[in-house]
Amino acid sequence: MRSLDAVRNLGILAHVDAGKTTLTERILYATGTTHKRGEVHDGTTVTDFDSQERDRGITIFAAAVSCAWYDHWINLIDTPGHVDFSDEVERSLRVLDGAVVVFDAVAGVEPQSESVWRQADRHGVPRIAFVNKMDRAGADLDAAVASIRQRLHPTPLVVQLPVGSEHGFTGVVDLIRMRTLRWVDDTMVDGPVPAELTNEARRRRHQLDEAVAERHPAALEEFYADSAVSAATLTAALRDLTRSGEGVVVLCGSAYRNRGVEPLLSAVVDYLPAPSDPGAPFAGLVFKVVATDTGRLTYARIYSGTIRKGESVVNAGTGRKERIARILRVHADRHTELAEASAGDIVAFVGPKTARVGASLCAQSAPVLLEPPTVTEPVVSVAVETRRSADTERLAAALAQLVDEDPSLTVRNDTQTGQTVLSGMGELHLEVAVEKIRRSRGLEINVGRPEVAYRETVVSGVSGLVYRHVKQDGGAGQFAHVVLDLAPCDDDFVFRSAVVGGRVPREYIRAVETGCRDALSEGPLGGHPVTGLRVTLTDGATHPKDSSEMAFRTAGKLGLREALRASVIALLEPVSEIAVTVPEDAMGGVLGDLAGRRGRVTASTTRTGTVTITAIVPLAELFGYADRLRSRTHGRGTFTARPAGYAPAPTRTVTG
């Protein structure tokens, strides 16, 4: 059995088009896992195996692969870079021990780079940075590192110096060993530092020593004694700083040209942590579910113990017993059967029928609930229907399967229109979901125009609103008396009680809060969910016979609805931060178009004949923007977007 110290569970994170999937391909090639380099533009990559991924040239679904690097085993997940699939990244980060974040050497930190970095921060995942595309015109390692420092706020610890620039990039100087690594016909050649780079390499090594000594006691002691830090001490210090999050090791290369991959793999082994085994009975977390032609695959990270083929486990959340019929080592769309799997492994199970994403699978003798990955609320919806009424049930089954595989998708029936509404993270997310049904089920589907998910918020609340719930219809009655104050707040919802003297018992106060939460689903302005609200229960009264938790829950719900109607309410709409990159001569037209879309420009930077405009734009105004931008710039403009919360919509506030 492989030692846990020799295992690395690793994610590859990046903004779309930073070269993440190409890097994954080169890792598989460098480790001997594959014998031919796959290319994104040819549709021949291992991890982008889905037909839509190959058609679109982007990663849509997180894909797991495994490889060996000398005496270490690496479980690697290639994650999507497009903002619409950020929940795939979230689910992957929940089960990973480390990550490589890929940056474009020309663009530096891009919007989705920042988003995935913050996601890794929330999960406490140690990471190293790889500045890719060093062979591109305009590539600048120092500028990319400066953007990492300024926008992401870590301490970058640069351990390499590029040899050559742009198209002349041929290798790197390893500042720790003070050796040069060059790549000739895909072969790495180790040699001395060239004379023309010696002084610069020494200067940068001294900077690295100083930066590490400032943050690590052992390195500081050695630096004070010798004005330098040895390679062994430096490596150990970098490992500690990476795992504690106090520093981020930065390497560089060109994945497309297969330069810089081997030292990156060594850095993964040297600096990123191995999984731990608490020595407890079996426990694993489901982070992905996929329906295949041969059955349902349940992907899980094992945190403790060992599971063997044919054994049964319990779903700690539901109490349901599930049988593990088969255990599979995953290599993208190919699988190898295993007899057992242990702590640190990332595998797929065949057998569990009801375990959803976030489920904790445990030994029956020791059930334990593991923290599930968070699910982001959908912001875009479309109505879907089949062209033939006979296919309605097939569509319902297909939608249920979609939601099972991807919890960031939701399906509901609109009671007013009778339509089936599919909601997700963005226009592309929904487009991919609908196309998946068309391809896998052969269904002809009509899709309505996308609509965004609005919210309602309180601009000015009310004080002392009295609501009395009394119901007498024979038998036991219902009585609840509440007095509510409403006010805006920065959180989604806050409830507190200021009742004194026991006028409302504690269990009834909890029921009032539950009722208030029930009322948040539909605001008075347009039936949208309510956010940014603080409710205070200031007083109340009970009846010795007719009061109950149900009565106070009803009073909380109906009382809050009445209070909202008496308040000043504003409509909120989702907004996105977009970064639009266009030729300088197209800047005027693009700015005018953004203004027409109610965009608010926050920054613009000019570099090598192009302009990057950053703006906040309502999500509803971005539908179809990609086609419009291509038309305005004759195909030369690109843009990326990421969620930026909610902002007031251009509509009048309403007061009751």
Image (spheres, helix red, strand yellow):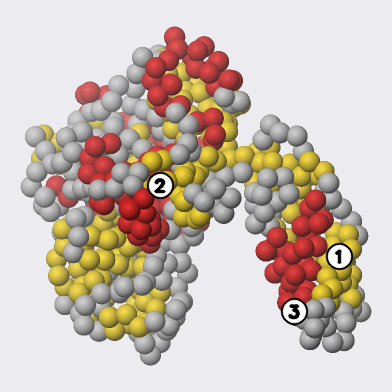
Cα–Cα gap, marks 3 and 2: 41 Å
In front: label 1 or label 2:
2
Residue depicted at x 27% and y 61%: 291
Q: Which residue is mark 2?
A: 385
Near-viewer residue (69 or 271):
69
**Secondary element type, mark 3:** helix
Q: From what the image shows, is residue 335 above or below residue 634?
A: below
Q: CA distance from mark 1 to mark 2?
A: 42 Å
Give SS at disc 1. Answer: strand
Residue 653 in view, yes or no: yes
Disc with the residue nearer the chain's start (3 vs 1): 1
User: In the rendering, at what x and y percent does residue 357 appear?
Assistant: 39, 65
For marks 1 and 2, the one nearer the N-term is: 2
Residue situated furthest bottom in the rendering: 365
Density class for disc 2 (Cα within 10 Å; few <14, some 14-19, many ≥20) is many
Q: Position of residue 476 (x, y in %)?
A: 79, 85
Q: Which residue is mark 3?
A: 549
Label 1 sits on what residue type? Tyr
Q: Residue 247, can we see it? A: no
Q: Are marks 3 and 1 in contact (CB under 8 Å)?
A: no
Residue sticking out furthest to the top = 585
Name the kind of residue labelled 2 in the image: Glu
For label 1, the residue is 467
Residue 242 percent location from the top left of the image: 41, 55
Specify the amino acid type for callout 3.
Glu
- Which residue is painted at 41% across and 61% down in the image? 94
Q: Earlier in the sequence, mark 3 or mark 2?
A: 2
- How many marks do you count on the picture? 3
Q: Is residue 485 above or below residue 184?
A: below
Alpha carbon of mark 3 to alpha carbon of mark 1: how far?
16 Å
* Place of residue 484 in the rendered image (x, y in percent of width and height, measured from the top left): 85, 62
| Residue 178 shown left or right of residue 555 in the figure | left
